[in-house]
Image (tube, rainbow, N blue to C red):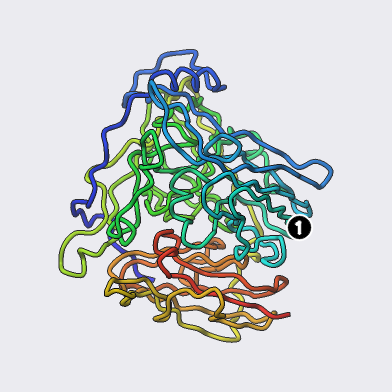
Amino acid sequence: MTSSSPDRLIPSRRHFLALLGVGGATTLLAACSTDTTTSTPTPTVDPGGAGFVQPEVLRSSGGRLELTLRAAPTDLPWGDGTRYAFTYNGSSPGPTLHLRPGDQLTIHLENALDADTNLHTHGLRVSPSGNADNIFLRVAPGETQTYVYDIPDNHPSGLFWYHPHSHGTVAEQVAAGLAGAIVVTDAIDDIAEIATSNERVWILSDPPIGTDASILATTRGDRMSGRQGDTILVNGVERPDVDAVVGELERWRFVNASSSRYYRLALDDHPLQMIASDGGRFAAPVKKDELLLAPGERAELLVAPATAGSFALRALRYDRGGMGAMMGGGGNVEPEEVVVATMTVRGDGAGAGLPTALLDAGELVLPEPSATRVLELGMGMAGGGGMSFTIDGKIFDGDRTDITIEAGTVEEWEIRNTSPMDHPLHLHVWAMLPVDDPVGWKDTINVPARESVRVRIAFTEITGRTVYHCHILDHEDMGMMGVIEVNG
């Protein structure tokens, strides 16, 4: 794999709006936060003001977790007024679900929206059939669908998430706020340095801001580029302040729950120690000065606050390409970097120690492929003379099966992107191991414009019919998705 340059700085098609006031909502959120500051450090950047707030946590007990998720339009507090959003159980994001290997998860999904919806447990290695992770199910307005997921006994620990996957409305429903985290824990989470860290889930989103459903309207150009919203939120809060202490390790678990936006993250004066990607733990921490998260990707990081002060977590500029690049013009890049959050550190003394080993490296060995395959991500003509997004020259058809594989097969896929923009490819149910950088398992991997990546996939244990697609969700809705079936 060759690297695309993050510094192709070309003006975006849409200006990033000035940060809005937080007003009464800030007061409410700060009151709910458990973060407190007992001293006033000399800041290196102005703190955001609102405390870091995490979603409600629901944990399994006795091997089971059963809950109801109600998807509905909601007016959420915003500044001195409200903003229109789609929520699960009245909040965006929805509750964080904590599970263990071997658990059974039951979700009753109630649809109070005006359009069909459904549920996808992104990254979970569970059955795609019946009433499990079956994205071909559609839940009509006013209806309820019960999903039952049996988490395998050998399921890896890690960070996953849930969101709608009803083809044609996915981008809108996710952009409007329908998302939530899933955390699977096991013995790895008992490693001393991890178990005693300050754990935080960061669900990154960029919703459109407004007071009614008109904010969800988009042009075809917006959808071709991949819609981006008006501001960046962390767990529904704009530019929160993380209270940290010198010597106490921070464990940050990130989900990119935006429909299209990429996040190229860097923390002032602090390296990011990455310990996991989409599919679970690395063998050991990997030091990064910055982290790129494509839509759908996750990452788990350790941060060791080293000195008192206030430090910005920034979303740096990143050009993911665009239609203008076909004619030598611009791509999709924000006009300036954005402060996503601040970390306000108090205290003094020695920094926190890092774990040295997380996972047996043997669990990250590349299996030898018994077959190879090439997938081409591209563009073609749609009806009426417009452009469409394709995989292997085809637009999605749920009645057509594009790839058929026998269970037990190990394949190597070369994913070629012939288009002028990045596409993050997401494979449901089965994990992928990058060939050129096999430090961790993935389920979503970015394929830069006019480049290619190689992954290996072991189609073992799980059988059934599901999909693979671009996780710029407008591109999925516009046809960049295929159907895969693994037969037992």
The correct choice, above or below, for 424 with respect to 144 in the image is below
- Residue 5 horizontal side relative to residue 79, left or right: left
Residue, x 43% and y 75% (percent of image)?
Answer: 395
Amino acid beneath label 1: Asp
Tell me residue 389's x, y (percent): 37, 71
For mark 1, give the secondary structure: strand
- Residue 12 horizontal side relative to residue 200, left or right: left
Residue, x 15% and y 67% (percent of image)?
Answer: 328
The correct choice, above or below, for 389 with respect to 289 in the image is below
- Residue 138 horizontal side relative to residue 214, left or right: right
Q: Locate the C terminus and report the quarter of the image it occupies.
A: bottom right
Is residue 327 visible to the viewer in this orientation of the structure?
Answer: yes
Q: Locate the N terminus and report the quarter of the image it occupies.
A: bottom left
Picture quadrant of residue 240: top left
Nearer-the-camera pick, 337 or 423: 423
Nearer-the-camera pick, 172 or 344: 172
Is residue 256 visible to the viewer in this orientation of the structure?
Answer: no
The correct choice, above or below, for 263 with respect to 433 in the image is above
Picture quadrant of residue 237: top left
Picture quadrant of residue 466: bottom right
Tell me residue 152's x, y (percent): 75, 60
Residue that numbered label 1 is attached to:
150
Tell me residue 306's x, y (percent): 45, 30
Residue, x 75% and y 53% (percent of image)?
Answer: 101
